[in-house]
Every structure is written in structure tokens, then in C-alpha cells.
Amino acid sequence: MSNNEEIKPFRIEIPQADLDDLNDRLARTRWANELPQSEVTDGVQKGPAAPGWEYGVPLSYIENLMEHWREKYDWRDWEAKMNAFPQFTTEIDGQNIHFFHVRSPEPDATPLILTHGWPNSSFEYLGLIGQLSNPRAHGGDPADAFHLVIPTIPGFGFSGPTKEKGWNEYRVARAWAELMKRLGYDRYAVHGNDGGAIISPVLGRLAPEHVIGVHVNQIFSFPSGDPAEFEGLAPAEMEYLQFLGSFVEHSVHDKLQQAQPQTIAHALADSPAGQLAWSGQLLGDALSPDEVLTSVSIYWFTNTAASAARFYYECKRTEQPTDPTTFPIGLASFAYDFRPLRRFAERDHKNIVHWSEFDRGGHWSAHDAPDLLIEDIREFFRKLGS
């Protein structure tokens, strides 16, 4: 770890020149071609239908959001919303770390570190801050209050690009343990989504004496290939396994960033339309247009498309432990998201003490089902006596 443990206040202040450059690029977008729209005469379609999403992100989707970006979106407004919360930076293991740190007005609140996913950033959790840190002000129980630490993964957003190889989930988790130590938190709760659901259990492995429990939105447990693991599975479970296989097969973002993160990065660093198509469309079902554009703008202004993609490359090459975890872990599984089968999750995690399945919400539940996520986090840590 670096000897420089100073924690510095931080404010987001994007130079006007960077906004002017973005607006200029938006105005000069060269659109990709796609198969033509078929002609419709007197309500009758002539020729094949225009492609939807089967070829990838349609031109119409990008055109609509790009027009909103150029004509209606106000970065300064969203910059001010983010700056309304206390932010800081510190150097850990040679890397700048950006984080929000919101202490609860309740003195006995439980420290909670929340880790975002890709292509989101610490922006993912801003909508949860009020209720998680100050439930009393929202009609809740003050015993449910948390002191919140919301870091930005190294290589993402305002943490800035990584400068060395090796920033995988283990190196990030070690940095999180050091961050919580610097903030004076000896025992703390942990939550993660997407990439954060990979990092958070590792933090539980590395710092079991400090971690109260780990709450995640996904448990990434798959069949090992042993035929015995399939014995007794119901037909619906087998069907769902086939769906999961298809889900993984079509995760083109994962595969490309695991294989050649630098290749796609050249396009994303030079084209706002490319950055929007690559990452923004993965957020669109859960986030408003302004929220999508805020997330995309964060990557654009910080030029972290390459380093965020490298996280996938590094994690793919991490040697994984074969022994199961033993710390308390809880799952909040949302309807339109990756949902593991419990028998495989219990193979990898021996102390699952909480398992919730919801009939709404998706991969970005902090945005499209915040009420369910907040209550599930509270319920899990109540069980652990935090």
C-alpha cells in the first residue's frame, strides 16, 4: 500500500472546454448504416420488416438518445446533483480511488460499502442515499441507518484510468478493505451489484474479521459439468439452465472486454455515439434518458472506457479459489436479471442466510426497484444483528 493515506475532498468540475468538445462531436456524428426500413403503403408492409435488436443496437435508439443529449440534457444540472453529496479521493496501492462518503445522523449506524457494476459507476447508488443513511427522515426505523461508503472501482469514472496490470476483483477488494480501515470502520456491511457482486464476496473472503455479511444482487454460480449435479432438477429448472446458457452465450460485451479490451476502447474514446451504443443501451430499460446520459457522460469525460473494460480482462485471468465461502451471504434476485439456482449457489457459498426473489425489477434494481432493494438490504443486516 502507498504511504500516502491522505483523504482529500473532491468535487466534480468538468471544464467547459470538454463540454464544448462533446457538443461539437455530437453535432458532427457520422451515423452507422443499417438495413433499410421496409416500405408501408396503405397499411400494408412491402418487403421484409426492418431489423430490430437482433443485429445489435438499432440506429433509431441511438438517434433518439443522441438528440436528447444534444438538445435537452444538462450535464451541469446532474453534476450539481452528484456534488450535493460529500465526495473524496485517496490513493491506495498506487491508484486514485474516488468515493462518496455519507455519514448517517444516527451515531450507531452500521457502516455499509456499496459497489457498483459496469457500465454504471458510483452514480448507481445516489438514489438510495437518503433512505439508507437517514431512514428516520423517510418514516423508517432509525435502527436501520447506515453510514455509506460508495467507491468508484479503479479504472472507472472519477477514480480515473488504472496505470498498472492486475486490477482484478481481488486487488479491488483489498483496496476496499484498506479504504474502510482509513475511514475508521472496523466492522462493516457489504453490498454489490453486477461487477460489485463479484468484488463483494471477495471482500468477505479477504477480511472476514471485519465483514458483517455480504448482500448481492447476483450469485454467479454455474454447473461444474458433473452430471450428478443435474439429478433431481425439475423440468422448469432445466429449462432455466438452458436460458442461462443462452444468456451467457449472448453476453458479447463480456466476451470482447475479456478478450481484447483495448480494441473496442479506441472507438469508445473517440465517439460519443459509440460510447452510448456500447454501454448506454445496457442501462436503458431501468434508467431514465437523463440517467443513461449521465452514466455515459461520466465515462466520456473521464475517458475510462478502456480501463473499465480492462477490469473484465483481468478478472477473466484471475485464479479462482475452489473452497466455498463461509461468511453470511444474502441474495436479492430480481425478476428480469440473472437468477441462480440455489443448489449451485450453495455449492459455492456454505452460509447463505437470506434468499429473496422478486417479481419485478431488473439488473439495475437501484434504479428500477429501489424500494425492494433498500428493504432487502435492511432485512438481511437485521438478521445479522448489525
Image (cartoon, rainbow, N blue to C red):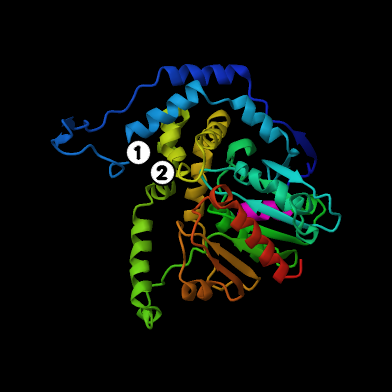
Disc nearer the start of the sequence (1/2) = 1
Q: Residue furthest right?
A: 107
Q: Secondary structure at mark 2?
A: loop
Instruction: Please state which amino acid type lies under the numbered disc 1.
Output: Val
Residue in front for this viewpoint, 357 or 327: 357
Q: Quadrant of the C terminus?
A: bottom right
| Residue bearing mark 1 | 57
Q: Is residue 360 above or below residue 71?
A: below
| Residue bearing mark 2 | 260
Q: Residue at left 72%, top 31%?
A: 11
Disc 2 residue crowd, few under 14, some 14–19, many 20+, Cα 10 Å: some
Q: Which residues are magenta?
A: 171-178
* Residue 175 on the magenta span: yes
Query: On the rendered structure, is 163 left or right of 268?
Result: right
Residue in front for this viewpoint, 238 or 349: 238
Instruction: Please state which amino acid type lies under the numbered disc 2.
Output: Gln
Residue 269: horizontal and vertical position, in percent? Answer: 47, 30
Q: Is residue 341 above or below residue 178?
A: below
